[in-house]
Amino acid sequence: MNTDMLKELRNLDKNDILNALGLESRRSSSDMVLPVLGIFTAGLITGLGAGLMLAPKSGQSLRDDARDMASDAQGQLKGKMDKARDYAKDATSKISERVAD
């Protein structure tokens, strides 16, 4: 019986212990940022598509505008991703400093 109990204890992970205590793991900043970026991107694409469909322009002009909008959106998304990456790095270094102390 003691060997079975030891095997069960070895198979426990952090979440099992936290659940037994009525706690849960802290969410990381990437767990919060990535869904927001996904929703933002979906809204951007939807708005772009609706705007293009309703625009009273010729085909070539419409394609040029779409290309310009996609390029602008790509630049904005890259900027937001860089900002999120910097935020995550800062948060990670702060947490590492606290743990080291």
Image: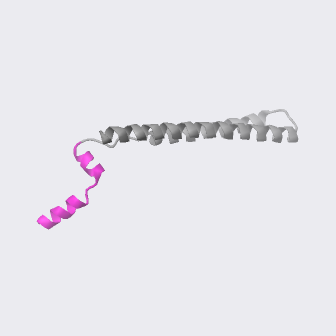
Main SS, magenta region, reads helix
Does 54 sit left or right of 14 as displayed? right
| Range drawn in magenta | 1-21
The N terminus sits in image quarter: bottom left
Q: Which residue occupies 67% across, 38% down? A: 75
Determine whether 15 is above or below 79 in the image.
Answer: below
- The colour scheme applied to this rendered structure is one colour
Q: Nearer the viewer, residue 28 or 43?
A: 28
Q: Which residue occupies 88% across, 38% down? A: 58
Residue 44: percent from left, percent from top: 65, 37
Q: Which residue occupies 45% across, 42% down? A: 31
Asked if residue 70 lies in the magenta stretch, the reply is no
Tell me which corner region of the image, top left, top right, bottom left or bottom right, holds residue 42. top right
The C terminus sits in image quarter: top left
The reply to whether residue 39 is visible in this rendering is no
Q: Which residue occupies 52% across, 38% down? A: 86
Determine whether 66 is above or below 17 in the image.
Answer: above
The reply to whether residue 34 is visible in this rendering is yes
Residue 67: percent from left, percent from top: 77, 41
Residue 72: percent from left, percent from top: 71, 37
Does 74 sit left or right of 86 as displayed? right
Does 4 sit left or right of 36 as displayed? left
Determine whether 9 is above or below 85 in the image.
Answer: below
Count of marks overlaid on the render: 0
Tell me which corner region of the image, top left, top right, bottom left or bottom right, holds residue 83. top right
Q: Nearer the viewer, residue 20 or 89?
A: 89
Residue 97: percent from left, percent from top: 36, 39
Asked if residue 6 lies in the magenta stretch, the reply is yes
